[in-house]
Amino acid sequence: MRAPLRAQLCLHLRASAHSPPRDAGGAIAYVKWAHAAGERAPDGSHLHRREDFFTSDLCRSWFKRFISHLLSRVNTVTGAAYRDDPAIFAWELVNEPRYQGDDTGDVLQRWIEEMAAHAKSVDANHMLTVGAEGFYGAASPSRAGDNPISGAARMGGDFVRNFAVSDVDFACVHVWADLWLYCDEECKLRFLDGWITGHLEEARNTFAKPVLLEEFGKWKPLGTRDAFFRRAFQLSLPPDTPVPSHAGGVLFWHMDPTDYPHDVDGFSVQVPGEIGTAEIVGAAAGT
């Protein structure tokens, strides 16, 4: 018997410059609206950076209004408000937030605390997370060298501090080895091992919440991709995960029909044509 399908929904999809497509709106749209409404930065300068989304009074107010509206919306098919809808597994505040140049992590931390508290005030029924990539910050000094990107500690995130927020129910980590690393496939598999294991250990040793491998993908060839997928599932799910007490599951990016024409990032798993990868996913899901 198959388990019911549950959806994790992201409240804000576009919060950093590296997340395509550029016409998807998101943070920069809010910033443009705030600028048009006459808001200025504390130093009197125009609002123009994506990062202004996290500090602008108008942007933060509007985003909270959006959260309230969406979580209270009534499903026209079922008649249930989203905050009461059992088909929703969890809410994600924002996808891959970055605040470039901030090595303190204070700006994103304040934003996460504020928005998480607001979301929970509207919907206490569903779990809540932050779609962070998992970069280590000042709260994990011994792991600073594990960050895959030069300057990651100055992008505003701090894995342990961000997910220790009381209104956040579980942690997330992303793995984009093909985008982050310039090395061979064995090197990328070693990174995968260390990245997932390290975050599970940090969660166990600090904020004691499960960790979801929320986003990962792998470029072809298929054999290389399948080996990466197989290892990602092993690391993130019992019985093979190194930290079974805090391994919270896996989501990959992304599945499409064969010959789907809009695979702009190269990570599309296309079925039934690429059935081998789909079988790995199905085996991990117990189907």
Image (cartoon, helix red, strand yellow):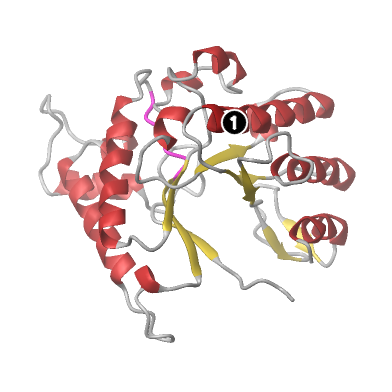
Q: Nearer the viewer, residue 91 or 252?
A: 91
Q: Residue at x 41, y 34 (%)?
A: 164
Instruction: Check the picture and name the quadrant holding the N terminus.
Output: bottom right
Q: Eyeballing the image, is 238 above or below 148?
A: below
Q: Position of residue 136 (x, y in %)?
A: 51, 24
Direction from residue 188 to residue 21 in the image, left or right: left
Give the labeled residue for mark 1: 199
Q: Which picture quadrant has residue 213?
A: top right
Q: Which picture quadrant has residue 69?
A: bottom left
Q: Eyeballing the image, is 260 above or below 190?
A: below
Q: Eyeballing the image, is 125 above or below 132?
A: below
* Magenta region, residue range: 95-100
Q: Nearer the viewer, residue 153 or 45?
A: 153
Question: Tag 1: residue type?
Answer: His
Direction from residue 186 to residue 84 in the image, left or right: left
Q: Eyeballing the image, is 50 above or below 143?
A: below
Q: Position of residue 271 (x, y in %)?
A: 79, 65
Instruction: Check the picture and name the quadrant holding the C terminus.
Output: bottom right
